[in-house]
Amino acid sequence: MRVYHISGFYKMNYNKIIEKAEAMRIKAYEIEKLAIIRSIQRLDGHEECYGTQRLIMCQDFDCPWKMDCLSCYLNLLGFENTY
């Protein structure tokens, strides 16, 4: 998977995502990042919107996935690395 670099913005570390998933009893082994994050969103009671077009109109400024979601969405659209 390509990584779209957004200079100066925080993206959640994959190991931290796995730790959070395992703490919520999500079996994250051999599951892609997108599915893990959407499972976490569902269990947290939020819409499973990570990496979707919803990002364009997203007003959830406290979302812990916001910058990583932007990167994922741009990758899904086929944007190449910028660094």
Image: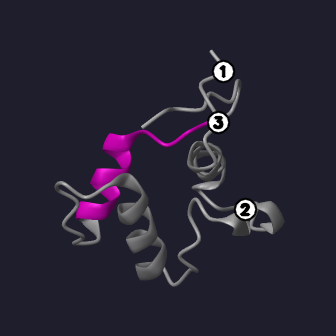
Question: Which span of residues is magenta-colored?
Answer: 10-22
Circles 3 and 1, Cβ within 8 Å, touching? The answer is yes
Neighbor class of circle 3 (other Cα within 10 Å; few <14, some 14-19, many 20+) is some
Q: Which mark is residue 13?
A: none
Q: Which mark is residue 55?
A: 2
Q: CA distance from mark 3 to mark 1?
A: 9 Å
Q: In the rendered image, which residue does mark 3 sit on? A: 79
Circles 2 and 1, Cβ within 8 Å, touching? The answer is no
Residue 7 located left or right of residue 68: right
Residue 10: image location, x then y, percent: 61, 36
Q: Is residue 31 above or below residue 47?
A: above
> Residue 28 falls in which quadrant of the image?
bottom left
* Secondary structure mostly seen in the magenta stretch: helix
Q: CA distance from mark 2 to mark 1?
A: 20 Å
Quarter holding the N terminus is: top left
Residue farthest to the front, as pictured: 78
Neighbor class of circle 1 (other Cα within 10 Å; few <14, some 14-19, many 20+) is few
Residue 75: image location, x then y, percent: 57, 43
Q: Residue at x 37, y 42 (%)?
A: 14
Amino acid type for the residue under numbered disc 3 = Phe
Q: Which mark is residue 82?
A: 1
Q: CA distance from mark 3 to mark 2?
A: 16 Å
Amino acid type for the residue under numbered disc 1 = Thr
Q: Is residue 37 magenta?
A: no
Q: Could you say whether the residue bearing mark 3 is in a helix, strand or loop?
A: loop
